[in-house]
Amino acid sequence: MGTLQLPPDCAERQSARLRKQVYELTLRDLSTFPVWEFRLDAEGEEGRDESTVRPYSALGPLNPDERMFVVRAVFILADGSQMYGYLTPPQRGDASVGALQPIIVTNRGQVRLWCGTATPDPKRLAHNYELLGKSANQVFPVRFESDVDLLGGPVSGSAPGFLVLKDFQTRRTTTVT
């Protein structure tokens, strides 16, 4: 017996109406729609701001220079296990971890590998490891790669721990585990 599939035009109409906050994306969302675009034109509408995303369908490879997206990514942890999440494909070739901002999505929540300028405190670290169901040695170093067809090929990177920006001028980071 086959699975129920929406006709393509119905699925497109459904995805056109769907809006979420990027930090609310789930594994199911990423499985159903591997590419999400930020919708800045939706700002000002109730519940919509610069974190609002909607599913996006590309005909052919996705061009990250067209607008800002997040795309499904595969993460390979230090213990060899695999998890899923998303990253921001680089615009104009900046593939630094700060630009990619990789995030692992679990059934219980999201874990940001890039922390910006906010150093995670011990409570936040413990919560992240709890969400992952793993210890620091099982997680880091973690490798990741985009899991959608991108113009210019896949984007990949690694993180030795949770990364924190220490200097804007030099882009120097520190690692926290």
Image (cartoon, rainbow, N blue to C red):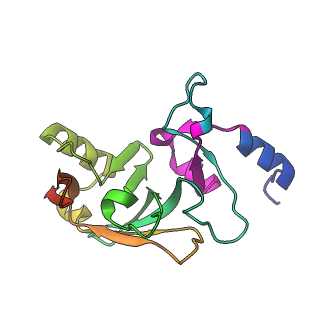
- In the picture provided, is 1 more to the left or to the right than 55? right
Residue furthest top in the image: 46
For residue 27: magenta?
yes
Residue 7 at least partly seen = no
Q: Is residue 93 above or below residue 112?
A: below
Quadrant of residue 59 within the rendered picture: bottom right
- In the picture provided, is 71 more to the left or to the right than 18? left
Q: Position of residue 151 (x, y in %)?
A: 58, 73
> Going 81% across and 54% down the picture, which residue do you hit?
5
Q: Which image quarter is the C terminus in?
A: bottom left
* In-front residue for pair 112/167: 167
Residue 110 at least partly seen = yes
* In-front residue for pair 172/144: 172
Q: Position of residue 95 (x, y in %)?
A: 38, 68
Q: Position of residue 50 (x, y in %)?
A: 49, 37
> Going 59% across and 49% down the picture, which residue do you hit?
37
Specify the segment rendered in magenta.
17-40
